[in-house]
Image (cartoon, rainbow, N blue to C red):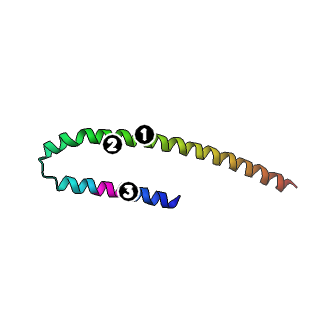
Amino acid sequence: MGYLKTFAKGVALGGIVGVIYGLFNAPRKGSELKKELAPKLRKAIVSARKVEKKALSKGKKVVKKAVKIEKKAVKKYNKRKKK
């Protein structure tokens, strides 16, 4: 799982660097570039929100499962401790 996080961070960082490089080296005026990028940026924001929502949902499921496991472990520990 650690490799996946590292890879995702690398992809995100590479994307950001690529966008910044493209903005500074674009052969267009700023106003033209803004008109061209605005719809793409809105689309990217919508996509990012969908990914965030899925990640939060999965994260909540993982936390609930971890809490259940922890409760079972505590019960087992307490039973053994009483003996």
Which residue type does callout 1 highlight? Answer: Lys
Disc 3 + disc 2, Cβ < 8 Å = no
Amino acid type, label 3: Val
Question: Which mark is first along the chain, 1 or 2?
Answer: 2
Residue 53 pos. (x, y %): 46, 40
Camera-nearest residue between 71 and 7: 7
Helix, strand or loop: magenta stretch:
helix
Decide if residue 68 is on the left or right side of residue 43. right
Residue 40 among magenta residues: no
The residue beneath circle 1 is 50
Q: Earlier in the sequence, mark 1 or mark 3?
A: 3
- Going by the image, does 83 lie left or right of 37? right
Residue 56: x and y in percent read 50, 43
CA distance separating discs 1 and 3: 18 Å
Residue drawn at (36%, 38%), measured in percent from left and top?
A: 46
Residue drawn at x 23%, y 43% is 37
Q: Which residue is mark 2?
A: 44
Which element carries disc 3, helix, strand or loop? helix
Q: Secondary structure at mark 2?
A: helix
